[in-house]
Image (cartoon, grey):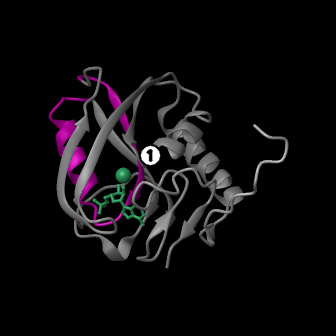
């Protein structure tokens, strides 16, 4: 590495939800979850890839024993719209039978992914399934019966990136939620 590497400027999407606001809200959600579960052990499922940042931030505020599991899901479709067809790209490691499960999702848009996931997980006979989603776009919802137990922010129907969320695999590492529109 040279002493003065050339400065590379990447496109920085405008801030939609600031880093400090996300931090504060994640802490509040964790407090609610802590209050509801007490010291009950849970299995927290990080949905890949978008859930990674929310998951690790939330995890650091949870007080109960947590078994961490990762579930790869991808919804078919183009970069900005999902079709509702979901495929599991990486399956769970541990059985869920009798477990209290907390699904940790980046965003609920149409709700089709989460609704598929909830059915998929219930087949594994857990004691309970709850869901935490950092973002929720109520205007985009196509599954009115979907239950989301913990919601970080309700946002209008626009495309956001950062804090785990991508556009064509880019921007996941942004520390804030930005918008491309
Ligand atoms: P669904 O439409 O609720 O099934 O959402 C499916 C997936 O689309 C989410 O888990 C995200 O990975 C992705 N997605 C939906 N809206 C956005 C967005 O605004 N930015 C980035 N990804 C999104
Ligand atoms: Mg997702």
Q: Quick check: is 22 in the magenta stretch?
A: no
Relative vertical location of residue 159 with respect to residue 163 in this rendering, above or below: below
Residue 115 position within the rendered picture, expressed as x and y whole percent measured from the top left:
23, 53
Residue 154 position within the rendered picture, expressed as x and y whole percent measured from the top left:
48, 68
Residue 93 position within the rendered picture, expressed as x and y whole percent measured from the top left:
29, 22
Q: Quick check: is 117 in the magenta stretch?
A: yes
Question: Residue at 37% across / 32% down in the picture?
Answer: 70
Question: Residue at 26% across / 59% down in the picture?
Answer: 146
Ligand 2 near label 1 (Cβ, under 8 Å)? yes
The residue closer to the viewer here, 147 or 171, is 171
Q: Quadrant of the N terminus?
A: top right
Q: Residue furthest right?
A: 3
Residues drawn in magenta = 97-126
Corner quadrant of residue 3: top right
Q: Which residue is mark 1?
A: 51
Helix, strand or loop at label 1? It is loop
The residue closer to the viewer here, 2 or 83, is 2
Question: Residue at 35% across / 43% down in the picture?
Answer: 130
Relative vertical location of residue 118 with respect to residue 59 in this rendering, above or below: below
Residue 64 position within the rendered picture, expressed as x and y whole percent measured from the top left:
53, 26
Q: How many marks?
A: 1
Within 10 Å of disc 1 (Cα), the crowding (few <14, some 14-19, many 20+) is many
Corner quadrant of residue 78: bottom left
The residue closer to the viewer here, 5 or 167, is 5
Question: Residue at 37% across / 72% down in the picture?
Answer: 138
The residue closer to the viewer here, 96 or 1, is 1
């Amino acid at each position: 590495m040279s002493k003065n590497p050339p400065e590379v400027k990447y496109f920085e999407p405008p801030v939609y939800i600031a880093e400090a606001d996300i931090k504060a809200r994640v802490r509040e959600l964790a407090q609610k979850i802590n209050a509801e579960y007490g010291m009950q052990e849970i299995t927290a499922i990080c949905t890949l890839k978008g859930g990674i940042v929310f998951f690790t931030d939330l995890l650091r505020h949870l007080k109960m024993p947590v078994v961490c599991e990762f579930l790869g899901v991808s919804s078919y479709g183009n970069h900005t719209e999902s079709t509702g067809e979901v495929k599991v790209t990486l399956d769970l490691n541990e059985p869920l039978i009798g477990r209290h499960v907390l699904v940790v999702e980046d965003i609920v848009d149409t709700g089709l992914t989460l609704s598929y996931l909830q059915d998929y997980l219930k087949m594994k006979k857990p004691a309970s399934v709850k869901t935490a989603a950092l973002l929720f776009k109520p205007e985009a919802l196509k599954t009115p019966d979907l239950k989301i137990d913990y919601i970080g922010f309700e946002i209008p129907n626009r495309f956001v990136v950062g804090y785990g969320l991508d556009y064509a695999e880019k921007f996941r590492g942004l520390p804030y939620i930005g918008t491309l529109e």
